[in-house]
Image (cartoon, rainbow, N blue to C red):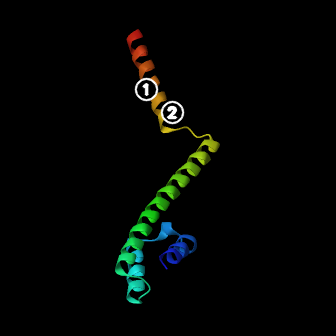
Amino acid sequence: MIELVKKTLLTGVGVAALSKEKIEDLAKDLIEKGKMTEQEGKKLVDQLLSSSEEARQDLQKQIEEKIQAVLEKMDLAKKSDFDALKLEIEELQKKADQAE
């Protein structure tokens, strides 16, 4: 039963979207209906919470990679580029002031 519930949630709803409260409510409901024991329910909650966190981290990493790829394609200057130019301008200004 636990495996069926896990497979359904992992493929159907999307584990990344599951909150701790929803997972606990689902386990509680299954326990109350006699579909699983409290021990199985706790194990299910722990496994789904772990999977949910991993899925969120994977999704965040994929989003960050896609955003980075889009920004690189746009050929935009980065903050570090502006900072380097600012530093160079300040150094040139100092040299110009000393030459006067």
Q: CA distance from mark 2 to mark 1?
A: 10 Å
Q: Residue 28: x and y, percent?
A: 37, 82
Q: Residue 73: x and y, percent?
A: 64, 43
Residue at 60%, 46% (x, y): give it.
69
Label 1: how many Cα within 10 Å (few below 14, some 14–19, many 20+):
few
- The correct choice, above or below, for 54 with respect to 43 in the image is above
Q: Which mark is residue 87?
A: 1
Residue identified by numbered label 2: 81
Secondary structure of residue under mark 1? helix
- Name the image quarter holding the C terminus: top left
- The correct choice, above or below, for 93 with respect to 33 in the image is above
Q: Nearer the viewer, residue 71 or 86?
A: 71
Ranked by sequence position, the earlier of labels 2 and 1 is: 2
Secondary structure of residue under mark 2? helix
Q: Nearer the viewer, residue 53 or 87?
A: 53
Q: Judge from the rendering whether residue 59 lies leftward or rightward of residue 97; answer left or right.
A: right
The amino acid on which the numbered mark 2 sits, given as a three-letter code, is: Asp
Q: Nearer the viewer, residue 65 or 23?
A: 23
Label 2: how many Cα within 10 Å (few below 14, some 14–19, many 20+):
few
- The correct choice, above or below, for 97 with respect to 39 in the image is above
